[in-house]
Every structure is written in C-alpha cells, then in structure tokens.
Image (tube, coloured by chain):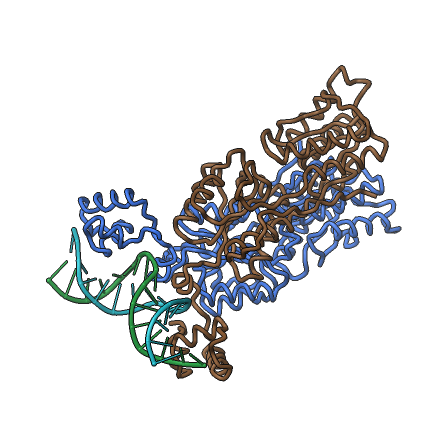
Chain colours: A blue, B brown, C green, D cyan
DNA sequence: CTGAAAGCGCTTACAG
DNA sequence: CTGAAAGCGCTTACAG
C-alpha cells in the first residue's frame, strides 16, 4: 500500500542498493544518479520505513526514559517536563525518537529497563535520578547497555551522568541569606542516602562555617523528602518548639520548592511574617510568595539536553566522549 | 549475539512457526508442545525482537504524542505530565509503547505528525488540545491515520476525542461562589476561538442567569490566554478602573490556575484581601493562597487514560468503539 | 496439531 | 560507480 524502496528503484531504473545509498548520501554514488533518484523519491513521495531500516541496521534510533519517581511527582515538579523537553530537543536534532513509560515503584523501573533492553526497542536509556544501590543502574551496567543518568549516582565508575553542582547551589543560597543579614538559618534536606541531599547540606554547612557562624542542630532537618508535607512538618516543629521561642531562625534554606511551599503554609497559618525562604526550581507559583526571596534554577532543560548528548555520543561510539557534565545552577533572587 | 526464535526452535526440536504460535498463544498448538517450548524459552532466556515482529506484522505497538503547545507550558501546567501518566498507564497495560516529541510551533507539530505517519513508526497519535482549523487534525484525517484528541476539536466529524464538560465546570464554580453570597463576579477566559474558552464562558454566564444575576460586561475578559500575565493584567485593569472604584467584583472565576496566580499577585500588590478566586487544575502551589477558594480538578490523568483507550480500540478495530468520552470534573472546595 | 516457505522493507559485504 | 544476493528476526497463509 505504501511506496517502497523497490518501487523507487524500478521507477528510477536503478537497483535497490543504489537507492539505499542515495538515502544515506554515500560518497560512492555519482551526482548524476543521486539527482535522478532524489527526483523520483520526490515524485513518488517516498518515505523510508524506519522499522525495516531498524531491523536491517540493528539500531532503532530511539532512546527510552525511566523516571525512577512516583508518577504524582512528575506533575508536581516542573523539573521532569523541562528535562524531557531538553532531551527531546537534542534527540530530534540527531534524528532520534524518545520513548517513556511511567511506573509505580523501583521494581516497576527495573521491569521497564528489562523490557526496553530485552525487546531491543531502544538504543539507549536515560535514568532520571538514581536511588541508593540502584537496581536499574546495576542491571544496565551488567548488560553493557548504553545509558546515562540525570543526577550523580553512588558509584560513578563507568557510568555516564549529568548533574548540577548541588554543593555550590546551596552554598550560594546561604551566602545570599547571610549577605541579607541572616545568620540563624534553618536547613531542610532531601531523602536519606542520596548524593543530592548530602551535597546540598554540605554547601549550606560550608557557607555557614566560612562566614563564621555556628550551626544549631535543632534547626537542621535531614533524611526528609522533597514534599510540601515534609516542609510543613519541619516548620511546625520549629514554630512549636518551646526552646526556640525567643530564638527562632530568620531564614530557611530548603532543598526543593515543594518543601518551601510547605514551610510557607506553616508560616502563614501561624502569622509569621519575619522568616524568609529559599528553594529550588524557581517554580512560578511558589515564587509569588513575598517571603520566598530566592530559588535555585537548576536548568533542568540543560540537564536533559546534556544527558541525551552524552548518551548519543556513547551510542554512536564517539571515542572522545566525556562521561559526565556539570550544568551550572543560577540563583534567582527576588528584587 | 542474541537468542533468536530460530535458536529456540532448534533447541526445542520444533519449527519456527510453532515457536511463534506459542508466543502468541495460538489455540492450534497442543498444550504439550506449548509447555516444552515455553520451557526452552525460559532456559535460553529468549525475548522476541519487537522490531522484527513489527516489520512482519506491520504494527509497531507504539503510539506518538503531539503537544500542540509551546514547551514552556509543558512544565508550568501539571496537566501535561498527568495526562502523560494516564496515557502511559493504559498503553502499558495493552503492551504499547509511548513516544513523544516537543516542538516550537504549529508547523513543528505538523512536521512531527508527518514524520510519525510517513516513517510508519507509530500505530496512532494522540493530540493534546486542538487549534482552530488544526493542521494536524486536517492532515491525519486526510491520511486516514488513527488518532485521538484531548479537548473537543472544532469539527468533531469522524474524529475521536475526550474532553471535560467545561460548561459544567465553570457552572459549578460560579454556583459555588453564588452560594457563598457573591453576585458581582468577574470572569477571565481563555484563548479566542477555542471550544474550551467558549464552553467555560457559557457555563459562567448560564449560572449567573439561572440565579437571576446580570452580567456586567466590564467584568468580563475574553480572548485571553492561560498565562499568569493575562490574569495579572485583567485584575490590574479591574482595580485601576475608576468606574468600578465603589463597585468592585467580590469574586473572580478564572479559566486556569496560572491566570488565578496572576490575579492573586495583583490582589496582593494592591493589598486587596476581599476578593476570592477560583481556578482550574487544583495546582498545589496555587491552592495554598488563602484567597483561592476553589479549583476545578479536570482529572487530567483520566483524560489521558481515555484518549489512549479510545485510540487503541480504534487501532485494534473494535467495531463497537465509541468516538468520544467526557471525563467528569470535580470542584475542589477549600474548607 | 505442525512445518516449509514466502514475505515484511530495508542494509551491506562482495563482486565487478 | 553500480548491482545481485544474502540477511536482519519475525508472522502467516498454505499445505498436510
């Protein structure tokens, strides 16, 4: 029903091989025949069947995405959509398609990875954020299957990854607060055991130390998660603590805008207007709050873009390809 | 390098046809041989090559997504990620993969559609929201290619679509405000020429009429867009209008949470605390505002789910498949 | 209930 | 510079 390569070959009076070579712009074909074949391709409105091409060349020109995240967070955090846009942008430029699959839990992730690899439907995989001792990373490494990771994994040995400088990000946020005159600063951290959590805490700690301020452990919340509930709970805890009643923090460095949102809710409910907050992702709706005075833009689209770039360089066997890339963050300060 | 169907056939002492039939669970194979073949499939850890299968069966078991939306909105509005999750959920259950591609403008959309169709890489397409006289819809219809649309298009003739009852949604929001004692209510609408805009305005208008309140045209903003900028501009307009100085609205029905966010910003900047707002999408960060008193949950995940369901029924040639489906909305009221 | 054979639409050594 | 032929790994009438 569709025009095939053979139809073109017959119409142009050449062999199928020649048409195929014209399509791949082989230097071994004379310009004269190239012109002629291209003309009949136009006339017959021929488009190659990519499935047949994939089978013959054993490459699908498709990459698969695995989120490693419960699907509710996909919509709450603009990070994912932005990173997807960046991936799609690079991939399209290189003629690659992008596939995704949502899932419920870590086993779901692994199932998707196994399906992608075993069915040979993708040439490579991009993982969004890595867990501790990540099953997908272990599996893909063991299979020798090309993949890249957004967010530096536990073991970087042999794995391609892109990430922000998370240390730098909270270091800057904290220094910004200090420059505004704050020095009793609370810190709200991310999930236990993740590099991102550790790095963001370290950045905060270092800034405090460099500027000569001590860290009050009662203002520090680690081993949390990136939810508004956690932010809310932390701030409620601070506001209801009797030991802090005359010695509250004046600022909070959070590790996520959703956390910040929870913090802001607690502040509002308690009519506290003299505590300011910083967050991550520069989410428009969160930044509208007057007490949000800065947010780290992680440049999610760039993270996606480079995760795709490094992956495709690996797939296409560029020998000089780098294994990781740091995307700079940018502290967005409110006027 | 990989185990093929032929390897399995040899190992099990049967023909390739038989292995293939076992894989598709054909009723014409005896249980005894089924068992034996399944055992060797396990032993050899065989997985079918889906690319070869696609070529032979001329079906890729993949659907493609086209957003019809500038990529910045993809991340700002949780709608897209939620709908994608719903699509992925249904598709995975049916053994289908999902592909997407971001783009810059309407021509970009059409390019993607042409690529999807011509390269025969997907079996069907889902369009997110339709434009007036949509080029993609026209093209796909003319090609006879299976597709479904999220959001009722201009011409529904022969096209599969899912949508909310947008009339009902704003009708309910407005009635809710009326029940709270409001009757001078402002309305902020969506883009010109879209069904969604018309329906949402009609729902508002009808509720006002049914309850016997007149509509003050100076409080109505149509032909806008779903951005915070537009919401902000509308509210600034209202607050600065000298003719309204003693006769302001007490409530605003917006057509989107981003609009609502802009409205809230204007209210906050002008220290206006006696105007309440309703929106769409139940965005957590927006709902935190005390003046947001209701938001319509459009159930984006369900919209995605059913857009995939109707599409796959069409692809698989279910004769009794319906052409459209209305996903109920749900007004989320704040306590 | 099972098999031999043709075919899906390309690519790519090999030969000239 | 070009072509004939094999092959990628499946599915599916057709025949028995």
Nearest the viewer among A290 and B125 is B125
Q: How many marks?
A: 0
| Side of B206 where B78 appears, left or right | left
| Side of B49 where A297 appears, left or right | right
Residue A128 seen in render? yes
At horizontal 24% and vertical 56% (from top left) the residue drawn is A16
At horizontal 60% and vertical 66% (from top left) the residue drawn is A107
Residue A20 at x, y = what percent? 27, 54
Nearest the viewer among A308 and B209 is B209
| Side of B220 where B24 appears, left or right | left
Q: Is residue B220 above or below residue A34?
A: above
Nearest the viewer among A322 and A81 is A81
Quadrant housing residue A179: top right
In the picture as drawn, the residue positioned furthest to the top comes out as B242
Q: Is residue A301 above or below residue B250?
A: below
Residue B90 at x, y = what percent? 59, 57
Residue A310 at x, y = what percent? 45, 54
Q: Is residue A332 above or below residue A153?
A: above
At horizontal 56% and vertical 40% (from top left) the residue drawn is B156
Q: Is residue B186 above or below residue D14?
A: above
Image quarter hosting the C terminus of chain A: top right
Residue A269 at x, y = what percent? 83, 42
In the picture as drawn, the residue positioned furthest to the right comes out as A242
Residue A302 seen in render? no
At horizontal 72% and vertical 47% (from top left) the residue drawn is A213
Quadrant housing residue B263: top right
């Amino acid at each position: 029903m569709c025009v095939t390569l053979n139809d073109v070959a017959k119409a142009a009076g050449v062999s199928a091989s020649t048409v195929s070579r014209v399509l791949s712009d082989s230097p071994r074909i004379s310009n004269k025949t190239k012109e002629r074949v291209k003309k009949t391709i136009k006339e017959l409105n021929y488009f190659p069947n990519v499935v047949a091409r994939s089978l013959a060349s054993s490459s699908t020109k498709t990459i698969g995405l695995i989120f490693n995240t419960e699907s509710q967070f996909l919509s709450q955090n603009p990070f994912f959509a932005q990173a997807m846009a960046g991936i799609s942008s690079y991939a399209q430029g290189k003629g690659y398609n992008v596939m995704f699959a949502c899932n419920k839990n870590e086993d779901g992730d692994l199932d998707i990875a196994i399906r992608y690899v075993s069915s040979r439907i993708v040439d490579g995989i991009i993982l969004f954020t890595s867990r501790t001792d990540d099953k997908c990373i272990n599996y893909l490494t063991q299979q020798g299957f090309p993949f890249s990771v957004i967010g530096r994994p536990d073991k970087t040995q042999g794995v391609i990854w892109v990430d922000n400088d998370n240390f730098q990000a909270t270091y800057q946020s904290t220094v910004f607060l200090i420059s505004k005159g704050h020095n009793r600063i609370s810190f709200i951290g991310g999930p236990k055991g993740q590099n991102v959590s550790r790095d963001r805490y370290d950045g905060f700690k270092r800034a405090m130390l460099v500027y000569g301020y001590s860290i009050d452990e009662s203002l520090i919340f680690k081993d949390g998660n990136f939810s508004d509930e956690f932010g809310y709970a932390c701030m409620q805890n601070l506001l209801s603590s009797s030991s802090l009643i005359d010695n509250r923090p004046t600022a909070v460095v959070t590790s996520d805008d959703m956390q910040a949102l929870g913090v802001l809710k607690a502040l509002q409910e308690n009519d506290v207007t003299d505590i300011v907050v910083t967050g991550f992702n520069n989410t428009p709706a969160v930044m509208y709050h007057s007490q949000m005075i800065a947010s780290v833009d992680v440049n999610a689209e760039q993270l996606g873009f480079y995760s795709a770039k490094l992956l495709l360089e690996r797939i296409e066997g560029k020998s000089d390809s780098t294994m990781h890339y740091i995307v700079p963050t940018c502290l967005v300060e409110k006027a």
